[in-house]
Amino acid sequence: MSTPRIAASLFLRASRSSIAKAPLQFRVLPIPSSRTTPARFGSSQFRPYSQEASSIKLYSFEDVKTLSETPSPSRILIDTREPGELQSTGTIPGAVNIPVVSQPDSWMISAEEFEDRYGFERPGKEVEVVFFCKAGVRSKAAAELARQ
């Protein structure tokens, strides 16, 4: 019973080693496209996806520096980075940390739970909230979550 199995195994090993392996070659061949040329539209024909995008204000470094040097009860700076990042890079004086990645529900929880979690009242609609992070991606996400 095992003799045919051994013979087959030996045959496969011998045949694999004797077959020359050709190097792989790739060619890029042009393929005619079935797509049509897109029509050109005037700028008045585009419909923006969101009308609220313009309400997000972008701050320069100098703007944020000025804001941190002149604190105001009608404004709050919120650092959306993770706590580990704060330990390695520091933060802006006067800013509070609300990490958007590890705590994305921060702006969806009740006002009482928000105060218990972060130690201050959730900012009202009349308060200017300035979000910041390392590259702007998390701060933009936090601004969108807070707006809802």
Image (tube, rainbow, N blue to C red):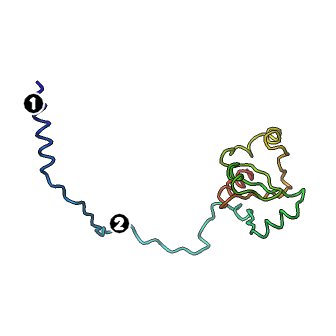
Query: Looking at this view, is 91 or 104 the one in front?
Result: 91
Query: Looking at this view, is 31 or 106 the one in front?
Result: 106
Image quadrant assignment for residue 58:
bottom right
Tag count in the figure?
A: 2
Please name the residue shown 65% across and 61% down the image. 135
Query: Looking at this view, is 106 or 37 the one in front?
Result: 106
Disc number lying in front (1 or 2)? 1
Report x, y in % for residue 71: 88, 60
Q: Which mark is residue 125?
A: none
Q: Secondary structure at mark 2?
A: loop
Give the crowd class for mark 2: few <14, some 14-19, many >=20 residues within 10 Å.
few
Side of 60 relative to 34 (left or right): right
Side of 50 relative to 79 (left or right): left
Image quadrant assignment for residue 88:
bottom right
**Location of residue 76 with respect to 61 vertically, above or below:** above
Amino acid under disc 2: Ser
Amino acid under disc 1: Pro
Q: Secondary structure at mark 1?
A: helix
**Of the image marks 1 and 2, the number of the one nearer the N terminus:** 1
Please name the residue shown 74% across and 56% down the image. 90
Please name the residue shown 10% across and 40% down the image. 11
In space, the residues marked 1 and 2 are separated at their CA atoms by: 55 Å
Image quadrant assignment for residue 56:
bottom right
Report x, y in % for residue 83: 70, 48
Screen quadrant of the N terminus = top left
Q: What residue is disc 2 on?
A: 34
Q: What residue is disc 1 on?
A: 4
Side of 142 relative to 43 (left or right): right
Please name the residue shown 18% across and 55% down the image. 21
Report x, y in % for residue 73: 90, 56
**Location of residue 55 with respect to 103 vertically, above or below:** below
Give the crowd class for mark 1: few <14, some 14-19, many >=20 residues within 10 Å.
few
